[in-house]
Image (cartoon, rainbow, N blue to C red):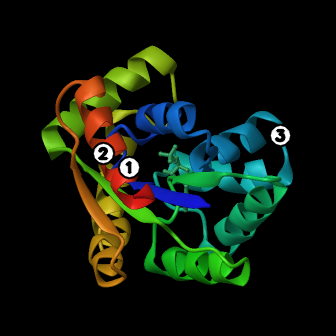
């Protein structure tokens, strides 16, 4: 199985590029943000809990996220591989992902870090908020999410470097150009 972690700050293009990866490599896609937004839309208990955190730009507690992730992962049958989009976001989640995959005889194949400068992230997120109406794409929440990214999520860059899975992707440019770099990195892993 090809297990790809697509990593980057909010607005770095993880969702857009994941869709292309899914199309080219036939992988299953887990976007934890999409899973949580669906729960909110369906008015579930989990959705109600998640909404409080999401609206504040904060992360959902690790234990809850890890359970959700394992159950979505196990729902895939005969999978060629999975793209993890928006997970892990903390060191605890990365450690839990490693354990969960090892228990299933799997491992992360590569972590793709889509790096985009901060001013460009702000511009993209504000634009997305205007177009999609995503409740957490407003000025104040965007700033909080970027702070959370730097304090809790960015340390994963060194964690994945130490784990030997890190691959840097320059996240500025055309969608096609960025995808070409991503596909090159994935083809390298496939060998
Ligand atoms: P995203 O669509 O990936 O930007 O996620 C939107 C929001 O969902 C985040 O700001 C968090 O509040 C929550 N969320 C998504 N994935 C995770 C995760 N792996 N851990 C904790 N919270 C998450």
Q: Is residue 11 left or right of residue 36?
A: left
Is residue 87 visible in the rendered image? The answer is yes
Q: How many residues crowd mark 1 within 10 Å: few (<14), some (14–19), many (20+)? A: few
101 vs 151, nearest the viewer: 101
Is residue 135 visible in the rendered image? The answer is no
54 vs 27, nearest the viewer: 27
Tag 2 near tag 1, CB within 8 Å: yes
| Residue 78 in the image, given as x and y percentages of width and height | 79, 53
Secondary structure category for the residue under label 1: helix
Quarter of the image for the C terminus: give it: bottom left
**Residue at image mark 3:** 43
Quadrant in which residue 96 is drawn: bottom right
| Residue 131 in the image, given as x and y percentages of width and height | 43, 15
Q: How many residues crowd mark 3 within 10 Å: few (<14), some (14–19), many (20+)? A: few
- Number of numbered markers: 3
Q: Answer with mark 2 or mark 3, whichever residue precedes in sequence.
A: 3
Secondary structure category for the residue under label 2: helix
Q: Is residue 172 left or right of residue 61?
A: left
42 vs 86, nearest the viewer: 86
Q: Name the residue located 49 percent from the left edge and 57 percent from the top edge.
A: 4
Residue at mark 2: C-beta within 8 A of ligand 1 = no
**Residue at image mark 2:** 184
Q: Name the residue located 83 percent from the left edge and 40 percent from the top edge.
A: 43
| Residue 35 in the image, given as x and y percentages of width and height | 69, 46
Comparing labels 2 and 3, the label whose residue is closer to the camera: 2
**Residue at image mark 1:** 187
Cα distance between the residues tagged 2 and 3: 41 Å
Which dot marks residue 84? Answer: none
Secondary structure category for the residue under label 3: loop
């Amino acid at each position: 199985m090809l297990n790809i972690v697509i990593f980057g700050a909010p607005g770095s293009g993880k969702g857009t590029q994941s869709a292309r990866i899914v199309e080219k490599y036939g992988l299953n896609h887990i976007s934890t943000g999409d899973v949580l937004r669906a729960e909110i839309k369906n008015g579930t208990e989990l959705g109600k809990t998640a909404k409080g955190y999401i609206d504040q730009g904060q992360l959902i507690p690790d234990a809850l996220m890890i359970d959700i992730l394992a159950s979505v992962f196990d729902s895939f049958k005969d999978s060629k591989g999975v793209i993890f989009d928006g997970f892990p976001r903390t060191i605890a989640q990365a450690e839990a992902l490693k354990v969960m995959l090892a228990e299933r005889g799997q491992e992360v194949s590569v972590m793709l870090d889509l790096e985009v400068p901060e001013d460009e992230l702000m511009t993209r997120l504000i634009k997305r908020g205007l177009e999609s109406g995503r409740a957490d794409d407003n000025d104040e929440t965007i700033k909080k999410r970027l702070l959370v990214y730097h304090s809790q999520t960015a340390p994963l860059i060194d964690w994945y470097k130490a784990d030997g899975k890190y691959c840097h992707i320059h996240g500025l440019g055309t969608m096609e150009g960025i995808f070409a770099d991503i596909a090159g990195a994935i083809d390298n892993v496939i060998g």
